[in-house]
Image (spheres, grey):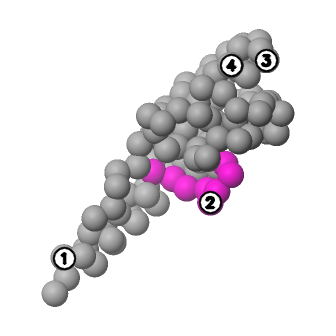
């Protein structure tokens, strides 16, 4: 059996100070409570700004840089989630995905496991 994937969901509708994001991202990137962080943001511009701060934290914060477990950080805008629902695409360090594609993958794996 596979371990469940633990996901944190962050809703970011207004930009906060960079120092606040450094603190928050350090906590998110070093937490053992989850494996992936999904951000729903107000705009693509906000997503890009947050991605840059995450890159800076990852490169320049010694604790984060040396942390043994890497967290997946993925982004989609609120508009895309609201309009595309399960088909909204979340992109990040790894392969982009939608909730619909994850649902399909899980369904196919479950079917494969139950076939004789």
Precedes in sequence: disc 1 or disc 3: 3
Precedes in sequence: disc 4 or disc 1: 4
Q: Residues within 10 Å of mark 3 (few under 14, many from 20)?
A: few
Q: Residues within 10 Å of mark 2 (few under 14, many from 20)?
A: few
Instruction: Kindly report the distance in space between the C-alpha atoms of the residues bearing marks 3 and 2.
Output: 27 Å
Precedes in sequence: disc 3 or disc 4: 3
Secondary structure found at label 1 = helix
- Reading the image, the residue beneath label 1 is 114
Q: Residues within 10 Å of mark 1 (few under 14, many from 20)?
A: few
Instruction: Kindly report the distance in space between the C-alpha atoms of the residues bearing marks 3 and 4.
Output: 9 Å
Quarter of the image where the C terminus is located: bottom left
Secondary structure found at label 2 = loop
Secondary structure found at label 3 = helix
Magenta segment, which residues? 92-99
Q: Position of residue 96 (x, y in %)?
A: 61, 56
Determine the residue located farthest toward the left in the rendered image: 116
Instruction: Kindly report the distance in space between the C-alpha atoms of the residues bearing marks 2 and 4.
Output: 26 Å
Question: Is any part of residue 32 visible from this angle?
Answer: yes
- Reading the image, the residue beneath label 3 is 18
Q: Judge left or right: residue 107 versus residue 36.
A: left
Instruction: Kindly report the distance in space between the C-alpha atoms of the residues bearing marks 1 and 3.
Output: 49 Å
Determine the residue located farthest toward the bottom in the rendered image: 116
Residue 40 or residue 69, whichever sits in front: 69
* Mark whose residue sits in front, 3 or 2: 3
Q: Position of residue 42 (x, y in %)?
A: 66, 26
Residue 95 tag number: 2
Q: Are marks 2 and 1 in contact (CB under 8 Å)?
A: no
Q: Residues within 10 Å of mark 4 (few under 14, many from 20)?
A: few
> Which residue is pictured at 66% across the width and 27% down the height?
26
- Reading the image, the residue beneath label 4 is 23
């Amino acid at each position: 059996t596979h371990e469940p994937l633990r996901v944190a969901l962050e809703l970011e509708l207004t930009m906060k100070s960079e120092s606040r994001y450094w603190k928050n991202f350090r906590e998110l990137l070093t937490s053992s409570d989850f494996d992936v962080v999904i951000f729903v943001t107000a705009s693509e511009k906000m997503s890009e700004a947050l991605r840059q701060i995450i890159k800076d934290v990852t490169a320049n914060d010694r604790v984060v840089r040396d942390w043994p477990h890497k967290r997946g950080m993925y982004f989609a805008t609120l508009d895309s989630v609201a309009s595309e629902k399960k088909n909204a695409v979340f992109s990040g360090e790894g392969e982009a995905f939608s909730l619909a594609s994850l649902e399909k993958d899980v369904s196919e794996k479950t079917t494969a496991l139950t076939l004789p």
